[in-house]
Each structure stands twice: as C-alpha cells, then as structure tokens.
C-alpha cells in the first residue's frame, strides 16, 4: 500500500469515527431526552392521594352521620356535619375534573365516581332535611355512602396496583434506555480515544512539518543574510516578502526593519514613477533588468541593481531586487583610468623631454660645428698672417729695414688684436650664457649711450655716416648701461660690417605704452628668408656672411642682454634692401611695475 | 377604603360583621397572637380586586379567577417583613410557603371563578391560585401543592 493510499485510508477512518461519534451522541441524547419527557409526565401518587382524600372525607361523613344519629345534634355539630358534607363533595369534585378526572376516566374508574357523586347528592338531600328538622337519618340512606367508601378504597387499590405496574414498566424502560446510553457512551469514548490518538499523531506530524519549514526558513534567511548584496523580494502587489539587513544598512527604511509585509512604495516612501517602482513594474512584466554601476542619490556610493521575476509555473508571482555596492570596484576602476592617464601624460612628457634633449643635442652639435667652422676660418686667418709675417722676418733677417719690421710687426699686432677680440667676445658670450654677468639696472640716459656708441664706431670707421633720430626718447631709462652699451655696439658694428659706404646707418628711438624701441637700420646684404629665426643663435652665421669677419656671437649676446632687461631683439627686412634690428626694453614705469 | 399604612395594631382593625372567611395570625408586635385579624367577605371585597386567567391541573379549560392579592393582605395586616406563611385549609391540609416567592409569583386569594363565587363544595370560599400559564417555573407538582383550596387560616411566620 502506498503512503498516499494509507493516508487516505487513515483520513477516511478518522472521518468515519467522527461521524459515528456524532451519530451515537445523537442517539444517546434522543433516548435521554425522550426519557426525561416521560419522567415529567406522571400523576400516579397525586391520583392515589386524591382518591384517598375522597375516600377519607366520605368515611368521615359516614362517621359524622352515626354521631348525629347517636344524639350529637348541637348547632356546632350541625355546622361541622355541614362542613364535612361540603368537604366530601369537594373531594369528589377534585377527582372528577382536570388531569385527575381524565386519568381516572382513562383507568375506567369514572363509573365509580359518577355513582359516588349521585349517591352523595342523594344523601345531601336527606342530610339537609335532617339538619333542618334536627331529626335522625335513616340507616338506609347511609348504605349508598358506605358502599361508595368501599368502592373508592377498591378503586384506590386498583389505581395503586396499576401505578406500581406502570412504574415497574417505566423502570424497565429507563433501565433499557440507560443501558443503550451507556453502550453508546462507551462507543463514543472508544471513538474519542481513536480521534484523540489521530489528533495527537497529526499534531506531531504538523510539529515536525513546522520544524522542517522553520529550518528551511532559517536556512533561507541565513543565505539572505550571508549575502553581501542588499536583497528584497516582493509579491505581485509590490508587497515585501523577504528583506535582508544588508539592504537595511544600504538603504535604511523610514519605518526601521519592519519592512516585510508592507508595500515597498509605502515602507520606503517612494513617489509615483520612482526608478525602483518602474523596475519592479517591468520585473513583474517578466523582464530581468540590470542597471550598471551608478552613484547613489547622496553620491557617497556606487551601486548596481539587478531584478529577476519569480515564477510559479508560468505565472509571475513576484520578483527579487538585488542591490550590489560596487563602490570599491568602481573607485578602483576610476583610479586605474587615472593611473593610465597619468602614465600617458608622463610618457608624453618624457617623450617631449627626450625630443627636447635630442634637439638640444642636435643644436649643440650644430653649435660645435659652427664653433669649429668659426674657429677654423676666423682664428686661422690672423694666425696665418702672424705665421707668414714671422716667416718673412726669419727669411729676411737683417736685410729687413726698420720700416718693414715696423710694418710687419704692425700686421702681427693687428692680427693679435683681432684674435684677442675674438677670444674675449667668445668668453663674454659664454659668461652671459652661464649667468656669470651681473645685471645691475639703474637710471641712465639711453640717448647718451647711443650717441657714445656711434662715436666709438666712428673712430674705427671714420668713413661711415650715422643718422640719429632720438626726438621721441624722453627722460630717464632704467637699464644696465654697460650691457646696453655692449648690445648697441654689437648692433651698430654689425650694421657697419654688412653694409658699405656711402649708405648711412640710421638709428632711431621710439616709445609706446610699455616699450622703448631702438631701431638700427642699414642698406646692407639683408637677411636670407628662413634664417631670420636662427640669426640670434650662438655661432650662427648667415649664408650670405661668408668672407666677412665674425664669430656668430654678437647677435646672440644682444638677445641675451635684451632678455635680461625683460625685452627682446628682432630682425626685420627693410623695404628697399637692407635690414632693421629692433632692440626693445620696457619703459622705466613698466619695469617698476 | 380601610387601607392603612404604617404599623398595624390589632385594635385598629375593623371587626368583621359577616361570617369569618379568613383569619390571619402571627403578625409581629401583635398583642394577642391567638386572635389575629379576621376577614369577612366585605373586608376582603374592600381590598383592591385583581384577576388571573389561567388553566389549572384540577379544572378543565382556562378559568378566570377574581380576588385579592396575597401581597395586599399581608400589607394590610402589616406583616410586610414576614419570611413565610403557613396556609391551613378546612380539612387541616397545611403547607408553608416563602412570602417573597408567593408574592413574586403573584399569589391571588381567589373568591370567584369564571364569574361565580367559589363555595366550600368547589375549593371555596378562598383558593390560593397563581398565574400558572404565564410562569413555566411554577408548572411543577411541588409548586402545585401550594395551591391551597378551602383556605381558612394564614399563619405569618
């Protein structure tokens, strides 16, 4: 027999026991109620008592009649006799009416009563006459009464016997009913024991089932609680069915931890159209939703949201919403991106540094090449002059005239002077570049500096003419006069060197809001296009400067001096041929500011 | 009307002029306990008259009883504090009844049934009756024994 069949059989038997119990109880109750009703009806003793009274009063009446005939005929005796007569009549009246009368009629005794009543009434007439005349009562008139007394006694006996028989039968009936009830109660008891046993067994299995259920629930709760994610489950109405404390920590509900069993929208006071409610609606519509990492409204954390519908068969009965705190992972990712960006920046910076280094190296090499080229040309020429003069003096020896010696020595000195100039120019430039020249600005007269520089140049090249225009230059200028003098001298000697007479050198000063411009212009060889920027680099010499003495350092020094003053120098082509160099330094007030 | 309130004294009561139907004895503070208060028909008729319609185990059908309330008689003789009374019939039948129960159940000293005066030959002249049909509690053989007919004396206890 399978377990299910056994269960069904047991259930059937139990239901049968309950039904049997009810039926037996009904049966026992019905029998007892019926017996109770029979107990209530019964007038046996009353009847016997009433018959006895009737018999007794009639007998007393007979005795009173004998007393009367015996001579007791006072007024009191008459009154007592009359009373006894009334009593006798009333007692017969009692057994002739009501329930007693009907019971006696049922017992077939009504004939006795009728004749007794008739006889009593007949005696009453005799009595009234005797009382009125105070005369004796004929003995014959008493015969009927005496017979009735006997008949009433006999009737009483019959009623008593019938009643005893009746009571006996009733007792038998009661006994039978009681036994039926006892048997029924025993059966009910047996059924009751069976039902209670079944009940206890059911309770035990229910307790076991409940225990298993509780274990399952505890296990589910343990799973829920051990999850690091916030989990909330809801039914089709949006009512919370499960909830873990992680969710409570992430999103504390206004109502505390009492969320299970409440509508999520009410527990969290979510307004209509809230993103969570929309997700729940879509989930109940059958979608599984994943919302990628996003910041919480308070901005403190990053979370991911997942929802899954819960199905029972094909129907969707609810959903699960999982909220995962991905702040750490998200921050790590952001940090990673920042690292990468920083790394790229660093790489770019390094690359730029390297490129700059390379460029610097290249420039240095260019510089070196320029220096070597400059040395080979500019230093070799005076050295070869010195060498050739020395050889001639050795060859000629004493043959040389004093004048010729002086001429040769003069050439040698000129060459040495030129070499000295080259060396000191180179050294000055190196000092400038190394920052070993002190910059000491003070108030000085720029116009005077310009004029003096021109004067010095005129001593060397008296054949050149200078046009100086300094009208716009007014007041004092703040600058280092030694450095500015050097710079102006370089510009002016360049203009002389790269142009030829009779073109004049034009020098003009100009002032605007911030700057003082000093322009030195010539009508010389000009500057080839594309070399204007390199012109101020150390040792650079323009391609059209070949054959002209120079170290390539002069303009570099001018720019360094201008920059020390916060200004600059630029080369511009001049309309009509030649070039213009503009030295620019800040005005005194601009410098002060 | 001869109803008096307050303390009743035997010498205050009128003397019966007709045949005495009922004697009430045993009132508290009574000078002559043996004498009591005797009622004739006129004295009883002077008390408020009441009626009960009920069936009884000793008569056929429903009957209309008229008479005075036991409560009024007890008040009349000033025995309102009495606990019980003994009712004695002409044939010396007697039974003790608690006064409170009898009054509560509306005991009536009936002198007329169905418009006819009760006589000694049919449970008269006075029959203690109760509204049996209206009160299932008193439809019981033990209570039926309190329906004293041919009442002649009430002993207050």
Image (tube, coloured by chain):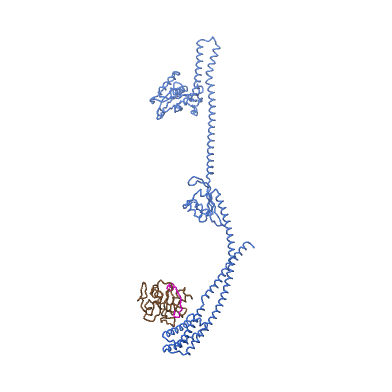
For the image shown, how many numbered marks are present on the structure? 0
**Relative image position of residue B135 (x, y in whole percent):** 45, 74
User: What is the residue that sits farthest to the right in this orientation?
Assistant: A1
In the image, residue A245 above or below residue A558 = below
The residue drawn where x is 54% and y is 74% is A35
Among the 4 quarters of the image, the one containing residue B90: bottom left
User: What is the residue that sits farthest to the left in this orientation?
Assistant: B1
Among the 4 quarters of the image, the one containing residue A582: top left
**Relative image position of residue A39 (x, y in whole percent):** 52, 75
Tell me which segment is drawn in magenta: B89-104
Chain B painted colour: brown
**Relative image position of residue A480 (x, y in whole percent):** 43, 24
Q: Which chain is blue?
A: A
In the image, residue A544 above or below residue A76 = above
Query: Would residue A577 be visible to someone looking at this image?
Result: no
In the image, residue A384 above or below residue A27 = above
Query: Would residue A6 be visible to someone looking at this image?
Result: yes
Among the 4 quarters of the image, the one containing residue A583: top left
On-image quarter of the C terminus of chain A: top left
**Relative image position of residue A194 (x, y in whole percent):** 59, 65
Q: Nearer the viewer, residue A2 or A387?
A: A2
Residue A238 drawn in magenta: no
On-image quarter of the N terminus of chain A: bottom right
């Amino acid at each position: 027999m399978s377990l299910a069949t056994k269960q069904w059989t047991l259930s059937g038997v139990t239901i049968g026991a309950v039904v049997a119990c009810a039926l037996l109880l009904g049966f026992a109750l019905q029998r007892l109620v019926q017996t109770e009703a029979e107990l209530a009806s019964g007038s046996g003793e009353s009847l016997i008592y009433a018959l006895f009274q009737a018999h007794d009063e009639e007998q007393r009446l007979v005795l009173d009649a004998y007393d009367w005939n015996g001579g007791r005929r006072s007024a009191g005796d008459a009154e007592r006799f009359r009373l006894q007569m009334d009593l006798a009549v009333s007692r017969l009246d009692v057994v002739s009416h009501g329930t007693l009368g009907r019971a006696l009629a049922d017992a077939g005794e009504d004939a006795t009563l009728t004749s007794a009543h008739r006889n009593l009434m007949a005696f009453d007439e005799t009595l009234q006459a005797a009382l009125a005349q105070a005369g004796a009562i004929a003995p014959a008139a008493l015969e009927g009464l005496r017979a009735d007394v006997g008949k009433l006694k006999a009737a009483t006996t019959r009623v008593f016997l019938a009643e005893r028989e009746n009571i006996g039968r009733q007792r038998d009936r009661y006994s039978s009913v009681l036994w039926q009830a006892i048997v029924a109660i025993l059966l009910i008891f047996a059924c009751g024991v069976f039902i209670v046993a079944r009940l206890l067994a059911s309770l035990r299995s229910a307790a076991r089932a409940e225990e298993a259920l509780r274990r399952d629930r505890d296990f589910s709760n343990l799973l829920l609680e051990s999850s690091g994610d916030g989990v909330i489950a809801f039914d089709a109405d949006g009512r919370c069915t499960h909830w873990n404390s992680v969710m409570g920590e992430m999103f504390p509900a206004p109502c505390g931890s009492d969320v299970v069993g409440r509508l999520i929208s009410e527990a969290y006071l979510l307004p209509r159209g809230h993103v969570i409610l929309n997700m729940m609606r879509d989930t109940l519509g059958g979608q599984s939703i994943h919302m990628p990492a996003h910041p919480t409204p308070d901005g403190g954390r990053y979370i991911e949201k997942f929802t899954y519908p819960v199905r029972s068969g094909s129907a969707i009965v609810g959903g699960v919403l999982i909220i995962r705190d991905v702040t750490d992972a998200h921050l790590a990712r952001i940090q990673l991106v920042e690292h990468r960006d920083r790394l790229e920046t660093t790489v770019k910076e390094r690359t730029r540094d390297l490129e700059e280094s390379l460029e610097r190296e290249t420039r240095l090499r260019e510089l070196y090449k320029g220096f070597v080229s400059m040395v080979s040309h500019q230093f070799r020429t005076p050295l070869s002059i010195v060498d050739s003069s020395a050889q001639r003096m050795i060859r000629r020896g004493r043959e040389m005239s004093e004048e010729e010696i002086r001429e040769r020595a003069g050439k040698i000195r000129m060459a040495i002077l030129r070499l000295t100039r080259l060396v000191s120019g180179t050294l000055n430039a190196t000092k400038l570049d190394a920052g070993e020249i002190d910059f000491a600005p003070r108030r000085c007269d720029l116009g005077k500096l310009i004029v003096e520089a021109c004067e010095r140049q005129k001593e060397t090249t008296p054949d050149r003419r200078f046009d100086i225009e300094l009208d716009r230059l007014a007041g004092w200028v703040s600058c280092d006069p030694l450095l500015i003098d050097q710079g102006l001298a370089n510009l002016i000697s360049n203009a002389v060197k790269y142009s030829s007479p009779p073109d004049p050198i034009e020098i003009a000063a100009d002032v605007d809001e911030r700057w003082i411009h000093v322009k030195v212009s010539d009508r010389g060889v000009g500057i080839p296009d594309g070399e204007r920027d390199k012109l101020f680099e150390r040792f650079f010499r323009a391609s059209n400067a070949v054959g002209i003495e120079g170290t390539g350092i002069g303009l570099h020094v001018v720019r360094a001096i201008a920059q020390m003053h916060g200004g600059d120098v630029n080369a511009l082509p001049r309309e009509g041929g030649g070039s213009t160099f503009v030295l620019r330094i800040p005005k005194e007030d601009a410098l002060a500011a | 009307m001869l109803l008096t309130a307050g303390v009743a004294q035997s010498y205050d009561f009128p003397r019966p002029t007709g045949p005495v139907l009922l004697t009430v004895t045993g009132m508290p503070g009574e000078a002559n306990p043996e004498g009591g208060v005797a009622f004739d028909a006129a004295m009883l008729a002077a008390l408020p008259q009441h009626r009960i319609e009920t069936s009884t185990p000793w008569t056929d059908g429903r009957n209309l009883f008229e008479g005075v309330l036991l409560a009024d008689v007890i008040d009349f003789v000033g025995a309102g504090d009495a606990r019980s009374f003994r009712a004695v019939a002409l044939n010396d039948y007697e039974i003790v009844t608690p006064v409170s129960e009898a009054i509560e159940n509306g005991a009536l000293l009936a002198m007329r049934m169905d418009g006819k005066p009760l006589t000694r030959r049919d449970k008269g002249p006075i029959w203690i009756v109760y509204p049996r049909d209206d009160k299932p509690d008193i439809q019981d053989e033990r209570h039926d024994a309190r329906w004293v007919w041919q009442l002649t004396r009430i002993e207050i206890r």
